Amino acid sequence: MINELSQQFSIKDHLSFTEIHSGFPAIQVNNQWATATISLYGGQILEFQPHEHAEPVLWLSEKATYQQDRSIRGGIPICWPWFGNSPYEALPSHGFARISFWQVHSTESLYNGETQLVLSMPCEAICKEYQSLTEYSLCDLSLKITIGKVLIVELITTNRSKQILPISNALHTYFNVSDIRSIRISGLEEINYLDKLQNQGKIIINEKN
């Protein structure tokens, strides 16, 4: 598999393929701006580090396991087509995108030295394994990743069926931080939110000070 992927999608001195664990192929990027590792299992970005940073931006557990049907702890796991507990009996929390193998659709070196790649998840084939999920078989799920001085991640769902489907998703990011007590998040002023840990799902009104 690694050889086939390399022949079709590798970019000399820029993008290559490797196995992070037996049976777990991954993309490695090293361009003029940053380095990154993307696992095809889960379509999961495991590492991202701009060259000017002394530490990785994303956190990956030293105890992360690479086992099918289990998510990789760290990076950016993808929750899809639901977030949290499954609405279907005996199906995994946070959906099946993070525990499925994704396919490489395209890779490209951009004019400004950034790297852009697109992954897709074979929903139709995967839904055959989960008989209760046939309604999602006509969904196209793709992930566009741009690796430069900053990391841009776009998760795109296209519903090709004629019915309305309930979908929730998340880029469940693990950030590498020094001290959680010194962290501030900007850009969410006056946005209401749920605090599951402190308020058990109660909506908190975030008023402007």
Image (tube, rainbow, N blue to C red):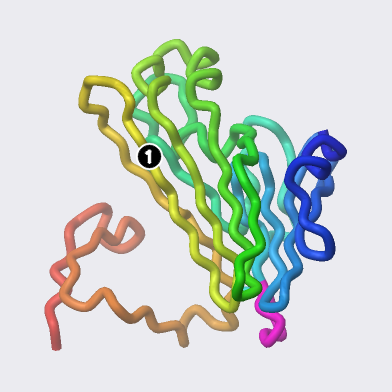
**Residue stretch rendered in magenta on the structure:** 49-56
Q: Answer whether residue 209 is magenta in the image.
A: no
Quarter residue 209 falls in: bottom left
Residue 61: percent from left, percent from top: 69, 60
* Predominant secondary structure, magenta span: loop
Question: In the visual, does 187 lie left or right of 183?
Answer: left
Quarter residue 11 falls in: bottom right
Q: Dot 1 surroundings within 10 Å: few (below 14), some, or many (20 or more)? A: some
Is 192 above or below relative to 5? below
Element assignment for label 1 = strand
Q: Residue at x 18, y 65 (%)?
A: 192
- The quadrant of the rendering that contains the N terminus is top right
The amino acid marked with disc number 1 is Thr
Q: Residue at x 48, y 42 (%)?
A: 142
Quarter residue 28 falls in: bottom right
Q: Residue at x 62, y 55 (%)?
A: 45
